[in-house]
Image (cartoon, helix red, strand yellow):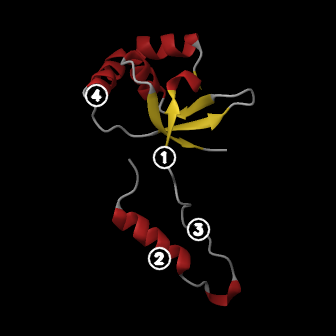
Amino acid sequence: MGKSFRSSREALEYSHKSVKGGRKARHQAPEAESTVLVALSEVFMSEAAVAKLLARDGQQIERYRQAYEHDEDMVRVVLRPRFDGGYNVEDGRHRVIAAKQAGVGFIEAKIID
């Protein structure tokens, strides 16, 4: 998933506008975002966190699992590299659990520092 063509074009136009008076703009245009495929085996979540989310949000996770099994488009997750390898989930824990339950091998992700 990602931004529409129109919002990407508007961001590009915004970033190319000159700033009057030589001062920096208060809000910078968003950086170009890219989506990568990450093996789910490299995405780590504690068993306690998974159990808590399944108990609390089991129906939502089940809907996501079905969506993955039917090959529907899903919003990418946001991952942060771990010091010892692999990734921690910054956004999208429900989707990661659902994808693992559905037997998906890879997930679309944005990697942040």
The alpha-carbon separation of the residues under discs 4 and 2 comes to 36 Å
Image vertical order of residue 18 relative to residue 51, above or below? below
Dot 4: within a 10 Å radius of its alpha carbon, few (fewer than 14), some, or many (20 or more) residues?
some
Q: Are marks 2 and 1 in contact (CB under 8 Å)?
A: no
Q: Report the quarter where the C terminus lies.
A: top right
Q: How far apart are marks 3 and 2 (CA)?
A: 14 Å
User: Where does label 1 land, which residue?
Assistant: 35
Task: Give the x, y percent position of residue 100.
Answer: 43, 19
The amino acid sitting under disc 2 is: Glu
Nearer-the-camera pick, 107 or 2: 107
User: Quick check: marks 4 and 3 in contact, CB under 8 Å?
Assistant: no
Q: Mark 2 points at which residue?
A: 13
- Residue with the mark numbered 3: 27
Q: Earlier in the sequence, mark 4 or mark 3?
A: 3
Q: Distance between the residues labelled 3 and 1?
A: 24 Å
Indicate which disc, 2 or 1, sits on the residue closer to the N terminus.
2
Looking at numbered disc 4 in the image, what kind of residue is underneath it? Ala
Q: How crowded is mark 1: few (under 14 residues within 10 Å), some or many (20 or more)?
A: some
Looking at numbered disc 3 in the image, what kind of residue is underneath it? Answer: His
For discs 3 and 1, the disc positioned in front in the rendered view: 1
Residue denoted by label 4: 67
Asked if 108 appears above or below 10 in the picture, the reply is above
Residue at screen point 36% across, 21% down: 61
Q: Earlier in the sequence, mark 4 or mark 1?
A: 1
Indicate which disc, 4 or 2, sits on the residue closer to the N terminus. Answer: 2
Q: In this view, does 74 lie to the left or right of 25?
A: left
